[in-house]
Amino acid sequence: MTPRFTRAATALALILPAQSATALTPEEAWASIEALSSSYGQTVTVAGTDRSGDTLTVSGITYAMTVADGPTVTATVGSATFRDRGDGTVEITYPAGYEALIAFPEGADGPKSLTLAVTWDQLSIIGSGTAEAAVFDMTAAAMTFTAKDIVDQDGTALDMSGVATLTGLSGGYSAQPGGTVTTFTNDMTAETMELTVNAKEPGGEGVLSGSMKTGALAIKSKTGMVDQALIQSGNISAALAAGFMVDTALESGPISMVFDFSDRTTTGHFDGTLTGAAVHVLLNADELDYGYALRGGSFNATGFDMPLQQIASSFGEIALAIAMPVKASDTPEPFSATLRLVDLTMTEEVWAIFDPGQQLKRDPVTLITDIDGTGAWTVDILDPAAQMDSGPDLPAKLFTLELTEVLARAAGAQVAAAGGLTFDNANLQPYGGFPAPTGKITVTMDGINALLDALVAIGVVPEDDMMGARMGLAMFARPGANPDQLVSEIEFRDGGLFVNGQQMF
């Protein structure tokens, strides 16, 4: 055997086992889909299976699921084919669409039942990987979800519908088993999404219609699934301890929306835009991290029997984010909280309601709170037993607090605060059971006197009350470096409270 032939044979021997190890058969692809559905609490039934040549046909597929204290969903898909492509992958073909009946519990808020019709155009699904860890890649020119046949709790058909259409879909999901936990990963994008709604008031003349369009949707998620009975038991703490977890992030491009309403006596119109939006959720046995952001927004509303002919506003950003531990601990764990309302503007018609003489500056309003720190829960806050215990003691310890950014800006005035504190949990005096703090916080106020003068001028605050407010500022603040600037240094040390160096207690 020549060296060249030996090297080629060796290379082929290395390649062939690798291809075989990652091959997926039609039967394995279908079994993986069944397992995926079961992990989410769905019951899958089929009329039969038939293998002919390279293709497995699964007929009469039905999915059913009951959500604890929620709806029952039954979807009839029909038949699907799984074709072995000869390269270790499987081509999966479904019918052009299916319908799902969603029935809500008796007495629940909202409808009694509705039908969700799902259709798609140029859907392609390719399965790969292995029987133990299958991967499914999907593309579609469009996918449409239509809510119809809506019935109220009395059994009366409602004249309303909703349609959501996504275009340019691409992505996939995979399953990775690991003992009692199966990890599912999903990564999907869509070029656009459009939602339309139409509804008529039951027994009335009210009509609502509207639409929303978004661009460039992207969602990434990872979910650790455990036994469904544990998830639906209501004890989220036990489910998390067993390995349940959720890590999801959604990003959206530009968003526009338009809604119109009319009845016998009233008409209304609303339209708005956003340059983008995002939301994320992380929950596992150690932490909770949740947040959303709306960017570059504007809206306009007319009618609706409002006292003004038109209300319009815009903002640069609205955001909220909270991150904190969820388990009980004796050691400090990091937490953070952020709230942002940036550059909120209002039209002159809104300002004129309380300031027709234009005494106040029409500057954009900004409110920002960004706090970091460390703390610890003394109980498992997600345990139902702990939630039922409403004892007198706080179920938490605070160790440090850092004001990363605190800012309020409006009507030509601004208040900013910065600084940090540490807390001695072994010393609960003399602060009434609260751990003794040590540290300094500096508050800087600009334009406050001018704002107070304007509030008196427009009659919001009487002159006598304002005199007391000015005296209070004089006690707790000193002039700063800039005109109409006040500074207050609040310091905790040696069990006492000091303001600008003067001990308060």
Image (cartoon, rainbow, N blue to C red):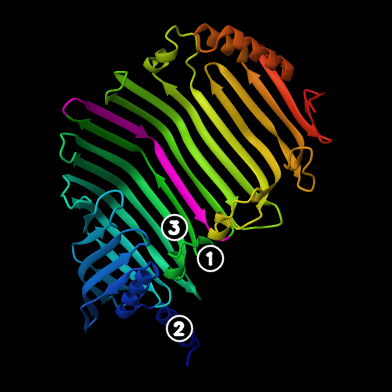
Which stretch did the figure color magenta?
A: 264-285
Judged by depth in the image, the label closer to the viewer, 3 or 2, is 3
Quarter occupied by residue 490: top right
Looking at the picture, how far across and down is residue 13, in whole percent?
45, 85
Quarter occupied by residue 215: top left
Quarter occupied by residue 137: bottom left
Looking at the picture, how far across and down is residue 190, in whole percent?
33, 50
The disc, 3 or 2, on the residue closer to the chain's N-terminal end is 2
The disc, 2 or 1, on the residue closer to the chain's N-terminal end is 2
Establish if 233 lies above or below 298: below
Quick check: marks 2 and 1 in contact, CB under 8 Å? no
Q: Look at mark 2 in the image and give the residue it sits on.
A: 8
Establish if 430 lies above or below 110: above
Judged by depth in the image, the label closer to the viewer, 3 or 1, is 1
Q: Look at mark 1 in the image and give the residue it sits on.
A: 238
Q: Look at mark 3 in the image and give the residue it sits on.
A: 221
Q: Amino acid at mark 2?
A: Ala
Establish if 419 lies above or below 357: below
Question: What's the distance in space between the residues labelled 2 and 1, CA to CA?
Answer: 55 Å
